[in-house]
């Protein structure tokens, strides 16, 4: 077991907050640095997969999260051109039958942040990381506008896909998405317990999923999204909300009770997605978690879940190691196979749902129609989306 360490965590997302909780409970001194004036969630809805739920249960937070979320039992999608099912994944086929939880990012964030504050973790705002300096057995974060001479035994980089201190090449993906949060209509014809989607080939995709509580209104909520190339964003915003609503309902008429709640384009946020496969830090005093190590398309719904698993695996490495060098080695060994597999799967599957042309969506539709009906294929797909494929329970503690 390591001696008590002074640890800096850069980034106040799910990965950073969960890591802070785990390591604080092991007795270490933790300081979180965040680039914003106050810690804030970014985005709309997300899926907490069974793998991520296992981490939240380890932290004692799962019951509170369930109270704010909606169970999602199925991922479902229709190719409108052929009126053919292009996605049909049911969590009941995974073996344990645990559904995902649809939740607003603000609900997950506030639950983790409250737990971190109760634990007595110091959070320092207005601290945008630009580099690190290492001297002897100490590492010092260097911030853009804030002078700091604080040095630490270890710095954990949870600053996301645009981390300035992470290795590996970052590739911006061709498609992003406009996201919005609305209230769940009382009367609608969208599947109530599913992430439901509609596609025109792979160049247009609309989706709706329940997210439990809408933090803005206190009512049951839904997240809606529209897949789009980021370079088209200015044109779409200039076209106005009426055009956006029309395009959405032309693809999916049953979505009208949801998109009719959008009053202006400012109700929507554009998400831009990246792919990164990082490599281990050259120093034992810098460790990456979440998107600063590995980020992918959201097509498999794994982003926040992978960060939570990183936090649990890193905690496990701390508990069984006698040095920081050993921590890094055990952490990477616990996570590498799982991370690499999901990054490969993301590269394979994302173009089937977000790309130009006709060949890839045709392959998708044929595969779903002919092969995804087989019981063994259904189970593999369900375990993949659940986040459990190639996940080492022994090394992560899950």
Image (spheres, rainbow, N blue to C red):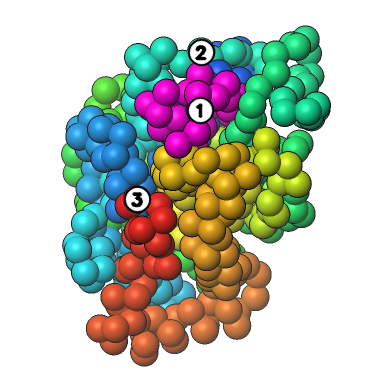
Answer yes or no: is residue 268 visible: no
Q: Foreground residue, 138 or 48?
A: 138
Task: Single out the mark in the foreground, 1 or 2.
Answer: 1
**Left or right: residue 329 compared with residue 25:** right
Mark pair 3, 2: CA separation: 27 Å
Q: Foreground residue, 249 or 342?
A: 342
**Residue drawn at the location 72% of the way across and 25% of the way down:** 138
Q: Foreground residue, 232 or 376?
A: 376
> What is the x, y in percent for residue 229?
66, 53
Task: Give the quarter of the figure containing the N terminus.
Answer: top left
Q: What stretch is highlighted in magenta?
A: 1-29
**Left or right: residue 111 compared with residue 352:** left
Count residues near mark 1 (Cα–Cα under 10 Å), then give few for <14, some for 14-19, many for 20+.
few
**Left or right: residue 376 compared with residue 15:** left
What label sits on residue 397 in the rendered view?
3
What label sits on residue 3 in the rendered view?
1
Answer yes or no: is residue 75 visible: yes
Looking at the picture, does residue 159 appear above or below residue 138? below
Task: Single out the mark in the foreground, 3 or 2.
Answer: 3
């Amino acid at each position: 077991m390591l001696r008590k360490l002074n640890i800096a965590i850069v980034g106040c997302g799910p990965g950073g907050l969960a890591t802070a909780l785990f390591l604080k409970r092991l007795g270490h001194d933790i300081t979180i640095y965040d680039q914003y004036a106050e810690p804030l969630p970014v985005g709309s809805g997300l899926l907490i997969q069974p793998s991520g739920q296992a981490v939240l249960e380890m932290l004692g937070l799962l019951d509170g999260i369930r109270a704010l979320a909606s169970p999602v039992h199925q991922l479902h999608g229709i190719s409108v051109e052929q009126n053919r099912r292009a996605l049909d994944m049911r969590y009941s086929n995974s073996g344990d039958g645990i559904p995902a939880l649809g939740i607003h990012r603000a609900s997950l964030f506030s639950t983790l942040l409250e737990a971190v504050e109760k634990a007595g973790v110091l959070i320092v705002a207005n601290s945008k990381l630009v580099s690190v300096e290492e001297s002897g057995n100490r590492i010092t974060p260097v911030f853009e506008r804030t002078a700091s001479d604080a040095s630490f035994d270890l710095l954990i980089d949870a600053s996301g896909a645009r981390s300035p201190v992470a290795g590996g090449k970052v590739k911006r993906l061709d498609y992003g998405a406009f996201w919005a949060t609305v209230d769940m209509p009382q009367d609608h014809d969208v599947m109530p317990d599913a992430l439901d989607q509609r596609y025109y080939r792979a160049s247009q995709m609309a989706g709706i999923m329940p997210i439990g509580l809408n933090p803005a209104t206190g009512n049951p909520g839904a997240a809606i999204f529209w897949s789009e190339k980021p370079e088209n964003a200015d044109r779409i915003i200039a076209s106005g909300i009426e055009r956006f609503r029309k395009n959405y309902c032309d693809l999916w008429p049953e979505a009208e009770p949801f998109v009719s709640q959008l009053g202006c384009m400012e109700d929507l946020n554009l998400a831009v997605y990246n792919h990164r496969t990082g490599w281990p830090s050259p120093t034992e005093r810098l460790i990456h978690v979440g998107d600063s190590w590995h980020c992918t398309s959201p097509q498999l719904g794994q982003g926040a879940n992978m960060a939570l698993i990183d936090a649990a695996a890193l905690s496990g490495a701390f508990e069984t190691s006698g040095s920081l060098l050993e921590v890094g080695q055990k952490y990477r060994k616990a996570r590498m196979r799982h991370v690499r597999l999901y990054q490969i799967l993301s590269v394979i599957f994302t173009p089937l749902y977000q790309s130009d042309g006709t060949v890839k969506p045709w392959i998708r539709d044929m595969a779903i129609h002919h092969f995804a009906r087989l019981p063994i294929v259904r189970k593999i797909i369900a375990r993949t989306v659940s986040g459990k494929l190639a996940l080492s329970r022994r090394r992560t503690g899950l």
